[in-house]
């Protein structure tokens, strides 16, 4: 990122090559629209080029995934998919677990790892992270108590992190 901040086009291209599949994959999962996912991918990388100082350090993969998710939510809001009062400002999950689970991985690895989770953990993660639903909305949709949903998401994210890190299989 230091080289991108210095306007090094080759460094930006390398960054794009490494992360564009992650950005596009997340956008596609959230939006369900290939054209919209392409637009979000372009917007995310344009934002990085125009404002590289927004990245202040830390895990770049987790940061770019969060930027992507937030941009997708902006698109969904603009499409008026949900009433504005019902749309969460941020995901209610523990950020550190989420960051560890999605950092430095590509979409195919995430899909494979998600497929290894039990349905009762995979479903609320997909509804929350990729579908943008709050934990309360997930509880209503599934008919499960809110505490159960929170536990399943937390346990599922930990297991997902372990699978992605290669520590254990589910």
Image (spheres, grey):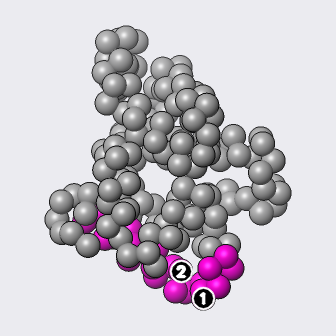
- Label 1 residue SS: loop
Find out whether residue 150 is within the magenta segment.
yes
Residue 59 in view:
no
Classify residue 57 as left or right of residue 23. left
Q: At x 35% / y 17%, what residue is drawn?
A: 13
Above or below, 83 relative to 135: above
Residue 144 in view:
yes
Classify residue 70 as left or right of residue 1. right
> Where is residue 124 drawn, in percent x and y?
52, 71
Q: Which residue is mark 1?
A: 145
Above or below, 30 relative to 8: below
Quarter containing the N terminus: top left
Q: At x 37% / y 11%, what residue is drawn?
A: 9
Given contact means CB atoms under 8 Å apart, are the residues at marks 2 and 1 in contact?
yes
> Where is residue 59 drawn, in percent x and y?
33, 45
Marks counted in the figure total 2
Q: At x 81% / y 47%, what residue is drawn?
A: 80
Q: Residues within 10 Å of mark 1 (few under 14, many from 20)?
A: few
**Which label belongs to residue 149?**
2
Please report the bounds of the magenta region as a residue range: 139-162
Find out whether residue 9 is within the magenta segment.
no
> Where is residue 35 drawn, in percent x and y?
61, 31
């Amino acid at each position: 990122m230091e080289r991108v901040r210095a306007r090094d086009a080759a460094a930006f291209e390398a960054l794009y090559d490494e992360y564009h599949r992650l950005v596009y994959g997340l956008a596609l999962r959230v939006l369900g629209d290939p054209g919209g996912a392409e637009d979000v991918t372009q917007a995310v990388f344009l934002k990085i080029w125009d404002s590289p100082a927004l990245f202040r350090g830390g895990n770049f993969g987790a940061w770019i995934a969060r930027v992507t998710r937030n941009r997708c939510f902006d698109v969904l809001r603009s499409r008026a998919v949900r009433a504005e009062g019902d749309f969460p400002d941020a995901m209610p999950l523990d950020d550190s677990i989420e960051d560890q689970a999605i950092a430095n991985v590509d979409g195919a690895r995430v899909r494979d790892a998600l497929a290894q989770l039990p349905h009762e953990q995979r479903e609320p993660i997909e509804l929350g992270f990729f579908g943008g639903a709050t934990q309360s909305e997930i509880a209503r949709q599934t008919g499960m108590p809110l505490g159960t949903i929170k536990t399943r998401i937390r346990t599922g994210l930990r297991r997902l992190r372990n699978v992605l890190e290669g520590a254990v299989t589910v």
